[in-house]
Amino acid sequence: MSSISSFQSPNSLRKLLIIMDSSSSPIKTSHRLLALAQQLRLYNPPPPSFEDDTDFEEQKLEESAGKVVSQLGFQESVTPVAVVQPERFRPKRAAVLICLFEGDNRELRVILTKRSSKLSTHSGEVALPGGKAEEGDASDSDTATREAKEEIGLDPSLVNVVTCLEPFLSKHLLRVIPVIGILSNKKEFNPIPNVSEVEAVFDVPLEMFLKDENKRSEEREWMGEKYLIHLFDYEMDNKKYLIWGLTAGILIRAASVVYQRPPAFLEQNPKFKLPKVMDKDTIMS
């Protein structure tokens, strides 16, 4: 039985209840969300894997930048990479918020945004709230919740951050940390999109990213390794959305962790080490 619907102890539940119901709302968190929070707090990302131990220190870069990237979010066929110090790959850090809540039918749902069509990059694309880390951010959780507040008006005090997933690599070689948080009372959240960045705020069922429905895949290649990117179609309030690339990859992984099962389709993620030397000729294709 999945631990989403089971509990470790009454004392653990009481502690979680205090944590998740610390707001002024009289509405209590459901047992399912409490159990999910308990499950995710115990989650440990898989350890990095290396071809041999002698390369470990050479591959180990600032703040775990040398970990094998288990999920790739390339959204274009070719992305040139320009690194100031090509002998030392130090990707900039970013974080996104996977904000989960219970829908009307008690299904787990996740909040997404459609980026403004006026933005210079990724315009009109679906994304998770988030962005690059800033000096004042004490943690990845701070980055993700701060960005969510700036983008969609989500008060960080409403979100119970429970865990972080392993890093993902964006097509621009940003090291993106997915932060999972639980919104115990969706009614307290009134989306206020930042119109300069966000065109729409919507939500989708998390489990859709494990199903081989309303989706298609495209094969890509980088450094001789073939991989698949997955594209999911979703319609809500007569509006159609396409969820793909990095966002889809992150949500497939999040759904696998939450529901404790693999997707019903072939992921085909590449398994390779980040190149020790990266220069202007290094590309992702």
Image (spheres, grey):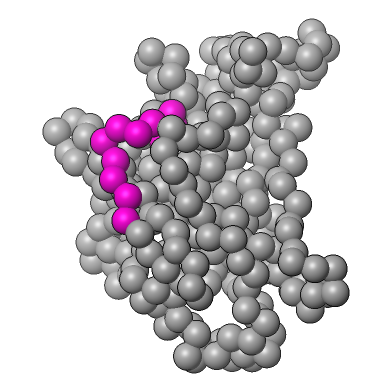
**Residue 70 location (% of width, % of height):** 59, 55
Q: Position of residue 228 (x, y in %)?
A: 40, 55
Residue 210 vs 198, above or below: the answer is above
Residue 120 relative to residue 221: left or right: left
Name the residue located 32 percent from the left edge and 56 percent from the top edge: 218
**Which residue is rendered at x = 67% and y = 31% of the image?**
40
The residue drawn where x is 34% and y is 71% is 77
In the foreground, 54 or 198: 54
Q: Position of residue 121 (x, y in %)?
A: 33, 70
Task: Report whether residue 126 is seen.
Answer: no
Residue 276 visible in the displayed image: yes
Query: Magenta segment range?
Result: 206-218
Q: Is residue 207 magenta?
A: yes
Taking the spot 28% from the left edge, 45% from the top edge, the residue there is 216
The residue furthest left is 238
Q: Nearer the viewer, residue 217 or 124?
A: 217
Q: Would you place residue 5 above or below residue 267 in this image?
A: above
